[in-house]
Image: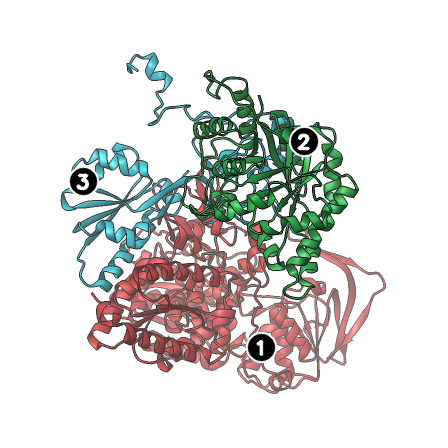
Chain colours: A red, B cyan, C green
Amino acid sequence: MYSAVTDNTQQNQGNRTKKSSTDHSLMPPCQATCPLHMDIREYVDLVAQGKIMEALQVIRDDNPFPSICAYVCDYPCEDTCRRCQVDKPVAIRMLKRFAVEFGGDRMIQVKAETTHRERVAIVGSGPAGLSVAYYLRKLGYPVTVFEADSKPGGMLRVGIPEYRLPPKIIDTEIQRLIQMGVEIKVNTRVVSLDRLFDMGYQAVFVAIGAHQGRKLRIPGADLDDTWTAVSFLRNARLKQKGNIGEKVVVLGGGNVAFDCARTARRSGAKEMHIACLEPRDEMLADAPEIEQAEEEGIVIHPSRTFTRIIDKDGHVAGVECLKLRSMEFDKEGKLHLDIIEGSEHSLAADTVIFAIGQCPDLNLFSGLSGLEVTKQGTIVIDQATLSTHHPGIFAGGDVVTGTASVTQALATGREAAFRINDYLQHRYPLAGKEAEENPLGDLFPETVETIRKTERLEPSILPTEARVKSFEAVELVYDWEAATEEARRCLHCGTGAEILFQDKCATCLACLRVCPYHVPYLDDSGTIQIPADQCQACGICVAECPAKAIVLRKPYGRQQISEELDHIVKAAAQLNLKPLIIGFCCQYGLSGTGTLASLRRGAKAGIWIVPVLCAAKVEAEQLLYAFEMGAEGVFVAGCGEQCARENIAFWVRQHVEKVRKTLAQIGLEPERLEAFNLSATDEEPVKALNSFTEKIGELCFASVITQEVKR
Amino acid sequence: MIVSERKPLAEIRRMIAPYQRLLTLGCGTCATVCGAGGEREVSFLNSALRVAQAKSGNETHTLSEYTVKRQCDLEFLDPLVEKVGDIDAILALSCGIGMQVIAERFPDMPVLPGVNTSFMGAVDEYGVWDERCAACGDCRLEETGGICPITRCTKGILNGPCAGTKDGKCEVSKDMDCGWILIYKRLEGLGQLEKMRRYYPPRNFRTIPRPKRIISQANIDTGEDND
Amino acid sequence: MTNSLFEEKLQSDEFLVTTEIGPPKGTDNSEMVEHIDLLKDKVDAINITDHQSSVMRFPSIGGCLLVKEHGGEPILQITCRDRNRLAIQAELLLAYSRGIGNVLCLTGDSIDVGDHKEAKPVFDLDSVQLLRMIRTMESGTDIGGNELKGAPKFCLGASVHPEADFIEPQLIKFDKKIAAGAQFFQTQSIFDLDSFRRFIQYAAQFDVKILAGIIVLASARMAQFMNNNVPGIMVPQAIIDELSSVEKGKVLQKGIEIAVRLIKTIKEENLCHGIHIMAVGRERIVPDILEAAELVRVSPK
């Protein structure tokens, strides 16, 4: 079933059209922020519906290595999530990890066929290199990856501690690439790019990363027991014997500094300190990272500058520091420090790790002409083509950008694959359109006020004692229920209602009156407007609009429900089960938590379920239509307490009452239509449903309508 | 807006009984706004009729549906010209005006009212409409602070409240405001209570003789109308 | 020339007593006649109600003619609910021609409270317009401005609701009724003498006679029912409690006691010019009330 992945990727190059959003101006901010522009809204929604396999498929459409991302993405999407305005962002990365693990990403095989003769060499097997390899392979090119180390993975393997990214995850992806036909040559350091062309490669992608650690230029920085973060982590990861002392001081305040300190903790250090320029609340590391580190006993010393490493008999004895009142970078990027006079003090240490950044090591390619290099030691490329000034040589990843996130590297890799394809096929290189798209703006305060606040479910993490003993992954994955619950917090930005048929709109203001979020308004010309950036996509106006002029931008609609109904009626006719009972059940929550499944199992035969995305979206006509199609009983089941909205039950009742009244007028028992609130937690739904089924049976028996209500 | 309300299903079924092929015709203006005859109600009604038909087992109507922008102007009915050949009657979900325009437009086609034209009114809250004007042809809202005693008072009296008012409500229903108390409060607020103290003579029911007709000044000027 | 004996009494300082009789639903008038005979000499005038509470009955004018035949002084009640201005004028001509001299001009209860809810509510006129119309007729023309061959003359009364919870608009209407020609007012039933005193203080400026409406409550449930269903009646909770406090079988007695108490106070304090007793179907008890309230006429007319 995943062969579709291959097909989509083919179409995705160039203008990567999103299946779900018809309007590019409505890109949700999460997607706009994601370097890979993943369709986060879509897969989060699929998780909410319990459609984990489908969610994974959406994830795989835009991400070559979702399992890796699920562990190490720096999730800028969560910073821009519009739920931040209401309470806390949707836990996007953990939902992705849930989808990846529960959807069985490990088992997925990606097929690739060789359709091109041109061979491409990739130098470096870090995230950028592997991403290029993946996409070029899918585009049909023979690809060879050259890796100087003994194992492929680059920074994934030697720069990120195991407790953050288990090696088996990397191995799985490497294995998948090999199955796709990517050739990986380890222990092979490329010393000359020209040589690669001699060997018959027609394009080269340089992605050697930034493995050159930096140290401060202060006295003592070159002592034996000083490390760069790169070398320290690399040593730890490759299990090379290192002489880590008992008192470790890490200089730097980013995630890498914490990686070092926490790795030192797991490698047997007794005291770990982190000292950095930034004040505590401006530290660059992620908040959970800081929190977990402190739990693990790591002491943080913010607002310090460092004057020297104390040298005692040729060994490190500590770091001499000054306290800072403030620090800031000016417009030119120059650092200004406001030092507190007389604040000299020292932090005792026998090991000092510099986690202050890293740069590419380009000495390897010294022989190659035409490769322009910046002052920072990165390769200069044309931003549109990702090509160096040397034809056929492309570059990407940290070697171009300096230290950046894994996800950015994957995005660059994907982009590079398409540009290399353009180069090899002699096409004019056209970059993707994402850059032109404006994500949705902020929610209005009035809208924010009307949105139900829901608690963000944080994933469990290993208890401190357990995690410091080994390099086990610290974060645990959601369980099924937590994941669907958390996914339902998504505000469905930009998928909301639009007046599709302006000519039909009678400007009756029904939408304006029923909207729980007060989104529709009359503009000065007397036309009703439903601002897409404020609409919460609840669908109530769609079900109420008397002119049927409103639709939801997402293609879940009446048609889908009608098709499902037709399908059910046909299937039911074949099985000839009586009585035929049709239930419209909220797919959110119910399905995710297995309630829907238990309904299907536990309820008596003859119940057919039409899954709907929120019970309030079921229109009165559809309820009646079910009877028209021959149902003897119909029910609507909402998800009850767990609903992400306040007023769904009210609208369900409205629709049910309208149809009940009509049934009575026809001479059918109104009890044939029932609304349930199915909550995930209790056993009652099945019981309630069974008693409903029995009642329908009795009604049919009592009034011989069974034979008559048919078409 | 002209507010209408769908007729009981039994009445509609009685009306359509003699006709085999029916077109349920919605109106995209007032009937849509008041939720009685828009596209949604047209398909809901047809669906209800089909369920009823299935239940009774001996009816075989063919029901089609269409909604025009406005039934009360002949021109909007043009799209129906090609449809009327295939139907035996039109079940109109519009006010009485629309139905009569249809009858005029299609002299051979029976027109059946699917709704009752109830009143002219305004929305109170979603799904709730209140009568506001009786089209009496003799508007006296200036005298009553902009609140119509003809429609807001169950008796339509002109010289103040009757003794039936209680808690500001009408003697007919505790849910209905007493129009005269509303008028009193409004005039008091406007500082115009003297308007209520005035004597108002019996109404003139002959402002325009029935059936009423208005001929615009423009037509008279151009001599198009011989009056 | 007026036919009204009651009008003369209105000029006097006598404490006036009127009561009302509801005509039967049907042609059997025997009970009504009985009531007329029972009461005609004990009160100053008898109102015959006009489809009271919008319940269709024998007409008021028919009842008035019977009162007349039996030697009583009738007050013709006319509401605007059922007849347009033509029908009302015609009825007034008939009434005058048959010697009926008093008319109580009412708007009339809403059709919705009665037993013919589907009927067309006419309300071509309201009570103020009705009063004016009669005065116009008295001047020799009908309301359409056409000359009458022989004009009627009436003593005109109207109703007022002194205990209305929103009193100001009621008072405005009271003023308008006086301006339109009302000579006497039979009030809606009163219970709360404090608010009645306030009303009297206001009404004192006008040259009209006020007859306090006294209703006889036969049970707490009846009081409750009237509060909910009969327009213009507001029985206070204290009265309902008082009725509930006595044992079964003695409730009517209690109701009478309450009515008598009210009447006595009104008379002692000389609050107004008289009373109007509404026995609502229990016309038989009116003499008992009068006796208890020491209002028995020494020399009946």
Which quadrant would the N terminus of chain A be assigned to in this image? Answer: bottom left
For the residue pair B28 and A485, the one nearer the viewer reads as B28
Tell me the tag on residue B109.
Answer: 3
The residue sitting at 34% across, 55% down in the picture is: A14
For the residue pair C10 and B176, the one nearer the viewer reads as C10
Q: Position of residue A365 (x, y in %)?
A: 46, 65
Which quadrant would the C terminus of chain A be assigned to in this image? Answer: bottom left
Q: Give the Cα distance between marks 1 and 3.
A: 88 Å
SS category of the residue bearing label 1: helix
Q: Is residue A321 left or right of residue C95?
A: right
Q: Is residue A542 above or below residue C169?
A: below
The amino acid sitting under disc 1 is Leu
The amino acid sitting under disc 2 is Lys
Tell me the tag on residue B72.
Answer: none
- Residue A120 showing in the rendered view: yes
For the residue pair A427 and A522, the one nearer the viewer reads as A522
Q: Is residue A16 left or right of residue A579?
A: right
Same chain for labels 2 and 3? Say yes or no: no
Find disc 1 in the rendering and name its residue.
A233
